[in-house]
Amino acid sequence: DYTGKEVNVKNFFAVLLGNKTAVSGGSGKVVDSGPNDHIFVFYSDHGGPGVLGMPTYPYLYGDDLVDVLKKKHAAGTYKSLVFYLEACESGSIFEGLLPNDIGVYATTASNAEESSWGTYCPGEYPSPPPEYDTCLGDLYSISWMEDSDVHNLRTESLKQQYNLVKKRTAAQDSYSYGSHVMQYGSLDLNAEHLFSYIGSNPANENTTFVEDNALPSFSRAVNQRDADLVYFWQKYRKLAESSPEKNDARKQLLEMMGHRSHIDNSVELIGNLLFGSAGGPMVLKAVRPAGEPLVDDWSCLKST
């Protein structure tokens, strides 16, 4: 319904609010919901502290998203809304912001201060077909999708899926890789069945839910911020030795690694200059206590 430049913050909010006159381009479809409707939203993109990626600029900030959810609640155009969010630092979008009394239940791929993780990557088990040099999925996202594929969603609750996804995304609670899946908002919706939000596969409607996760584990996963390196490494690895193409691929890989190292060193240097060599690293890694929003002044954050 919306592609390319039509995928933007203005249209996303207009679609969510059911505001047909505010939509620009695309099919014009909006979430034309009423007070008895159950709504499901899945959002997946890059993320950072307090911000979500968009194909177009400006990006989407946590305070603006929560304000729109509050407006939708005030308009009385849903009974309950479930929001699944895949992004790095995705917990920062709802942490300390999403009220627990507006009928919105959200889960996120990570907490407010960590990356999410890619999976089905080359060299993993299971791995993608050999013609693919990139990670094909995100650990949180493929976990809830694959869980939905095999269970009876008429009987599986939001809480049951959350527990399974949380465990799988944390490498069966070992955290040898993976992230902390979080939940926010109206947790009283935990008992609701998934069927109300995403339907169900009729072929699964005679199955019985079990807490033990029957989905496969992964040998490892890739931090999302290293996923681009996987592509360049695979490109280099597969080319013939001493070929011009392999030399070019090696140059690309080293340039990217050098650029990342330069940024890390520059930020560390700025921290040391501002706060001293002892205090700089601590300040740069400092985060607010759990339950508090990322910042108090979102306008200041957006101006950086």
Image (cartoon, helix red, strand yellow):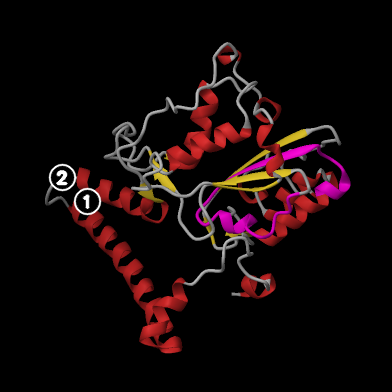
Callout 1 environment at 10 Å: few (<14), some (14 to 19), or many (20+)? some
Where residue 167 sits, quadrant-wise, is: top left
Query: Where, quadrant-wise, is the C terminus in this rendering?
Result: bottom right
- The residue where tag 1 is placed is 245
- Please say whether residue 153 is visible from this viewpoint: yes
The location of residue 51, given as percent across then percent down, is 59, 60
Stretch in magenta: 72-100
- The residue where tag 2 is placed is 240
Residue occupying the point 59% across, 18% down? 201
Q: Does 166 sit left or right of 194 as displayed?
A: left
- Please say whether residue 29 is visible from this viewpoint: no
Looking at the rendered structure, the kind of residue marked 1 is: Glu
Q: Circles 1 and 2: CB distance less than 8 Å?
A: yes
**Secondary element at tag 1:** helix
Foreground pick, 44 / 102? 102
The location of residue 282, given as percent across then percent down, is 42, 77
The location of residue 149, given as percent across then percent down, is 52, 24
